[in-house]
């Protein structure tokens, strides 16, 4: 046991002292903070109000194109050529030309721009015109649009979990996210650190360092120490990422999280805009008040839903299961990756052996999204959360939804048994393959190694 502990220390200290480990541990939280903050910052920086000049020859939209939060309209009169000349002298976003037409046949509407009109501007103008034409069609048919809007239902279903502890609010979105996040982390960490084991074994094998090491330790002790040591490295890096990510996100939010003031609207076209300035300001104030109240109400409801969903999650159970399946899944697959590293002489030869190992991981990852989230208590979810090769990912998706204690204990017991079994197989391959050089290995040869006496 003391020899295994010495190997664990060597593997751990060797890796945590590497510059690559230190750089990635410090850089990843900063990149995560930038990934979370930068999109919002860029949107704020590019969120200037768009102003569109409107020449309406049909008269259908006169006084009916209401200014929105970041889209304003300036009405023009005169000919199309005069409107184009006036538009060229401004820095407005576009010129909207509406020819003479009827609400039954709205054709010929054109948007002029100094550059290519953005897709967002085109869609927003189309939606605005569509809504106004629909309103006029409702009025022409004798229907009341406001009455229809009030009739339109917006049903929100409250979900409650009838558990043994009593009734609890349940938020399916929060529950799904909690399970998927844990499963994704386990999935990538198994690959990341499992491959490190394989590369470490190949490196020691090709440099012949292992020949010196096994003169004082058994191959099984060497493999076990390497697996556990790298597992400790992964756990250390993961915990540091959690702490540093929280600090980085908080710091970056404090620096860049100041709400940008709304950009001032461009000056209205000379003469035409001055007459309607006061009216536009009143409309903007009224619309802004209504929009802000609706947005604040919606945001408050969303935040309350999230808080209730998070508060009803079994946080301690989820975190405990995450640590168990994180380590259990890594140890199970790490032993197999170590066996592959011992069986080959270089990374090029690992492809034929990697595929059978990675297939269960990939299938469990895909099935978690396509099947398990839809029916976390179904037969597919049950069996995939019990089988050791798929349980680390699938069970993490199921845990937030609630899993019977006997299923969870059975899954954990089988995962431990699976780790012991795969470690035994890997050690049989490892003891022979670690000293095998210059020979192309196939599955038939590997099966013979299981029964060699060394």
Image (spheres, rainbow, N blue to C red):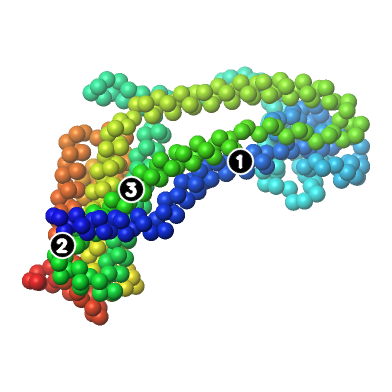
Q: Quadrant of the N terminus?
A: bottom left
Discs 2/3, front: 3
The residue tagged with tag 3: helix, strand or loop?
helix
The residue tagged with tag 1: helix, strand or loop?
helix
Q: Residue at (14%, 59%) from the top-left corner?
A: 424
Q: Confirm or deny contact between disc 2 and disc 3 (CB under 8 A).
A: no
Q: Quadrant of residue 90?
A: top right
For marks 2 and 3 on the same chain, the one whose residue lies earlier in the sequence: 2
For marks 2 and 1 on the same chain, the one whose residue lies earlier in the sequence: 1
Identify whether 54 is placed above or below 28: above
Identify whether 353 is placed above or below 64: below
Q: CA distance from mark 2 to mark 1?
A: 53 Å
Discs 3/1, front: 3
Q: Residue 41, which numbered label?
A: 1
Which residue matches tag 2?
Answer: 220
Q: Residue at (77%, 42%) from the top-left corner?
A: 93
Front residue of 79/86: it is 86
Q: CA distance from mark 2 to mark 3?
A: 24 Å
Q: Residue 236, which numbered label?
A: 3
Q: Position of residue 88 (x, y in %)?
A: 87, 45
């Amino acid at each position: 046991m003391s020899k295994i502990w010495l190997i664990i220390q060597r593997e751990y200290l060797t890796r945590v002292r590497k510059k690559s480990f230190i750089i990635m541990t410090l850089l990843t939280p900063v990149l995560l903070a930038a990934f979370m903050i930068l999109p919002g910052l860029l949107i704020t920086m590019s969120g200037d109000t768009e102003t569109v000049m409107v020449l309406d020859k049909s008269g259908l939209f006169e006084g009916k194109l209401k200014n929105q939060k970041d889209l304003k309209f300036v009405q023009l009169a005169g000919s199309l050529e005069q409107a184009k000349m006036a538009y060229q002298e401004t820095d407005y976003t576009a010129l909207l030309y509406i020819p003479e037409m009827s609400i039954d046949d709205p054709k010929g509407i054109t948007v002029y721009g100094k550059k290519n009109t953005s897709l967002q501007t085109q869609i927003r103008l189309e939606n605005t015109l569509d809504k106004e034409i629909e309103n006029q069609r409702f009025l022409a048919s004798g229907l009341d649009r406001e009455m229809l809007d009030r009739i339109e239902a917006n049903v929100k279903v409250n979900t409650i979990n009838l558990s043994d502890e009593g009734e609890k609010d349940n938020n399916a979105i929060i529950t799904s996210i909690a399970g998927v996040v844990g499963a994704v982390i386990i999935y990538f960490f198994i690959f990341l650190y499992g491959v490190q084991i394989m590369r470490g074994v190949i490196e020691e094998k090709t440099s012949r360092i292992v020949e010196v090491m096994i003169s004082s330790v058994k191959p099984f002790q060497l493999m076990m120490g390497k697996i556990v040591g790298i597992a400790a490295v992964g756990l250390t890096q993961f915990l540091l990422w959690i702490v540093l990510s929280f600090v980085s996100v908080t710091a970056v939010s404090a620096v860049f999280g100041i709400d940008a003031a709304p950009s001032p609207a461009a000056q209205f076209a000379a003469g035409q805009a001055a007459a309607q300035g006061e009216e536009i300001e009143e409309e903007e104030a009224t619309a802004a008040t209504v929009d802000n109240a609706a947005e604040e109400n919606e945001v408050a409801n969303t935040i309350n839903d999230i808080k209730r969903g998070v508060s009803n999650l079994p946080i301690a159970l989820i975190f405990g299961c995450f640590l168990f399946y994180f380590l259990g899944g890594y140890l199970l697959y790490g032993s197999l990756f170590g066996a592959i590293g011992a069986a080959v002489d270089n990374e090029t030869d690992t492809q034929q052996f990697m595929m059978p190992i990675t297939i269960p991981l990939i299938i469990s990852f895909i099935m978690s999204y396509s099947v398990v989230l839809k029916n976390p208590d179904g037969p597919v979810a049950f069996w995939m959360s019990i089988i050791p090769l798929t349980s680390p990912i699938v069970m993490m998706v199921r845990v937030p939804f609630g899993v019977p204690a006997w299923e969870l204990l059975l899954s954990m017991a089988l995962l431990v048994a699976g780790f012991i079994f795969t470690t035994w197989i890997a050690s049989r391959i490892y003891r022979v393959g670690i000293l095998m050089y210059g020979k192309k290995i196939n599955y038939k040869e590997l099966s013979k190694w299981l029964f060699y006496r060394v």
